[in-house]
Image (spheres, helix red, strand yellow):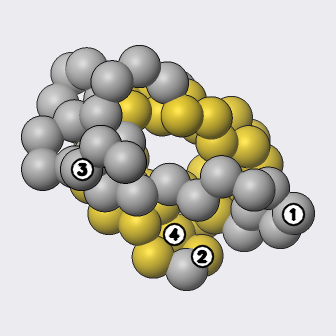
């Protein structure tokens, strides 16, 4: 799923997709080097468990940064 990061906290990641829907993921990214920041455009790779929770196993930054983000 692709979208813009609207919230990023330890263990959780919320993105807004192209349909303007907000989706919250449980994001224990372990050894992944990239840490998503609010405003980043990302692609989230996830799987859903039996309780309906979406667990992220990989996040990749894509495209240009969204509103409110700073370019380094």
Seen at 41% across and 19% down, the residue is 63
In front: mark 1 or mark 4? Answer: 1
Determine which quarter of the picture holds residue 46.
top right
Numbered circle sitting on residue 12:
4
Q: Secondary structure at mark 1?
A: loop
Asked if the residues shown at circle 2 and circle 1 are in contact, with their CB atoms under 8 angstroms apart, the answer is no
Q: How far from the left and from the top, in percent, is residue 16?
A: 28, 39
Q: Secondary structure at mark 4?
A: strand
Crowd around label 1: few <14 · some 14–19 · many ≥20 (10 Å): few
Residue 55 left/right relative to 11: right
Residue nearest the viewer, comparing 64 with 7: 64
Crowd around label 4: few <14 · some 14–19 · many ≥20 (10 Å): some
In front: mark 4 or mark 3? Answer: 3
Among the two numbered marks 1 and 4 on one chain, the one whose residue lies closer to the N terminus: 4
Asked if the residues shown at circle 4 and circle 2 are in contact, with their CB atoms under 8 angstroms apart, the answer is yes
Seen at 83% across and 67% down, the residue is 30
Residue picked out by circle 1: 31
Residue picked out by circle 3: 70
Among the two numbered marks 1 and 3 on one chain, the one whose residue lies closer to the N terminus: 1
Seen at 25% across and 20% down, the residue is 18
Q: Secondary structure at mark 3?
A: loop
Among the two numbered marks 4 and 3 on one chain, the one whose residue lies closer to the N terminus: 4
Q: CA distance from mark 3 to mark 2?
A: 23 Å
Q: Residue furthest bottom?
A: 10
Can residue 63 be seen from the camera position used here? yes
Residue picked out by circle 2: 11
Q: Is residue 28 above or below residue 66?
A: below
Seen at 21% across and 21% down, the residue is 19
Q: CA distance from mark 2 to mark 1?
A: 13 Å
Asked if the residues shown at circle 1 and circle 3 are in contact, with their CB atoms under 8 angstroms apart, the answer is no
Q: Secondary structure at mark 2?
A: strand
Q: How far from the left and from the top, in percent, is residue 37?
A: 40, 58
């Amino acid at each position: 799923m692709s979208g813009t990061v609207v919230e990023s906290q330890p263990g959780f990641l919320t993105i807004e997709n192209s349909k303007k829907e907000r989706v919250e993921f449980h994001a224990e990214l372990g050894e992944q080097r990239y840490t998503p920041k609010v405003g980043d455009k990302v692609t989230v790779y996830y799987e859903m468990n039996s309780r309906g929770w979406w667990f992220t196993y990989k996040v990749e930054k894509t495209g240009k940064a969204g509103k409110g983000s700073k370019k380094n």
